[in-house]
Image: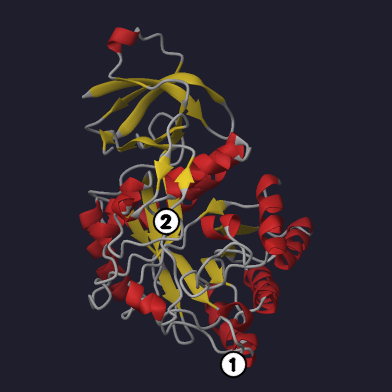
Amino acid sequence: MIKKLSARCVTSAFDQRMQIEFCDQLGEIIRVGELGFEESELDFHFPDHCLLFAGMGDVHIHAREDVSGKNTYKEDFLTATEAMTNGGLCHCGDMPNNPIPPIDDDSYSQKFALTSKTQGRIWTYAGIGPKTNPLTFKVPYKAYMGPSIGELFFENFDQLNESLARYENQWVSFHCEDPEILEQAKNEATHFERRPVAAEVLATRDALALIDKYGLKGKLCHYSSGEGLDHIRDFRRKGGTVMVEVTPQHLYFSQNNISDPQFFQMNPPIRSEVDRKKMWEALLNNEIDFLATDHAPHTLEEKRKGISGLTGLDTYASFVCWLITQKVPLSIIAKMTTENPGDFYNEFLESFQKLDHKHHQHLIGYLKPGYAANFTILNLAEKTFVDEGFLKTKVKHGPFLGITFPGKLEALFKEGRRLV
């Protein structure tokens, strides 16, 4: 059926009240603009304190499900999808550090098939390891430069260089921590000291060199180092292209304000207040491309044993509301939560369609005719209190427990169907 809505619509180019006509059967936008519908003709009308964005996306999560099923006690694709819905997300990219990692055509296709239960809301990365080779079709890749969670990582730069030579011109996302510095620091007293800024900075320099050397389409994951940002800026000034993620937790927390360092353990760690402020400066200067949660669920028992990883899907929308109240320009919000994630997904749409045509049919990320009718609508007049009952993630914990955010998810549409 043809549906009509009116809302204050936000993109990187405009912030204005518009009307959208869309088809919930085809799942796509038909028209956008000042269409002249009377209020009585509208199926949905959202007041001006509600902001409509093209469906938000998180390009970096760990849903924990693979063909082994070994880690689904932490999370699975269905519970991750429930948390995504709670957080106002229309799509997410799942990382490959699984017990059976997706590293070739068969293992990637088998894992991707498991995502069909999410109706196209989760897509997947392939892993790069010391002995892997590119797939025969276009997919996003992830390279763990040093040990994190899982066994898919490199022990030194030479090993990484040798592998990436086989991935020329591919889309590669890097976890930037140098393995040799991590090895040298492994006996330090705290997690913060065991994973120092120096490891991220050196790995950043190496990743940028490899991006340039092999013509990679590069992305640096969950970035946290202020010093490393200077190398990224220098690389860009010289004509290099690289994209950068930041997590909500690296923007909100520092070593100054975390109450339980063991619970807040993640890789890379929550940094100093100096680093946090430098990440904020980069965000406000439009130097950050993605707000990505690095949603990494572990049980509380595992967290007490020192396992790294924090959840984040449930609080995505409410955190974005907080960013807006902190005077982050709406154009930047739209870029890093909708348009850039949409562009990233769209690069691989043809491959995703071949793997699961039923659930991957449309381009996403923009309020344009022919694109998916995906809408994330935020209400800035109400608040969200985060407690255990609010969370849909299977592990029922997160870094923002006990915090009240100045806004809430008002509505979520996926391909024309209202989910919230």
Q: Quadrant of residue 201?
A: bottom right
N-terminal of the pair, mark 2 or mark 1, is 1
Residue 400, image x and y in percent?
45, 55
Q: Which mark is residue 187?
A: 1
Q: Residue at x 49, y 69 (%)?
A: 264
Dot 2 crowding, Cα within 10 Å, few <14, some 14–19, many 20+? some
Q: Amino acid at mark 1?
A: Asn
Q: Is residue 303 left or right of residue 333?
A: left
Q: Is residue 157 above or below residue 286?
A: below
Q: Quadrant of residue 323?
A: top right
Residue 318, image x and y in percent?
45, 44
Q: Is residue 350 above or below residue 186?
A: above
Residue 405 in sight from this viewpoint: yes
Q: Is residue 156 above or below residue 18?
A: below
Q: Is residue 417 above or below residue 99?
A: above
Q: Residue at x 76, y 63 (%)?
A: 230
Depth check: give the residue in front, 313 or 94.
313
Q: Residue beneath label 2, please?
A: 401
Which label sits in the foreground, 2 or 1?
Answer: 2
Locate the C terminus and report the quarter of the image it occupies. Answer: top left
Locate the N terminus and report the quarter of the image it occupies. Answer: top left
How far apart are the two marked residues, 2 and 1, measured between alpha carbons?
Answer: 31 Å
Q: Amino acid at mark 2?
A: Leu
Task: Report how many numbered discs are placed on residues in the image.
Answer: 2
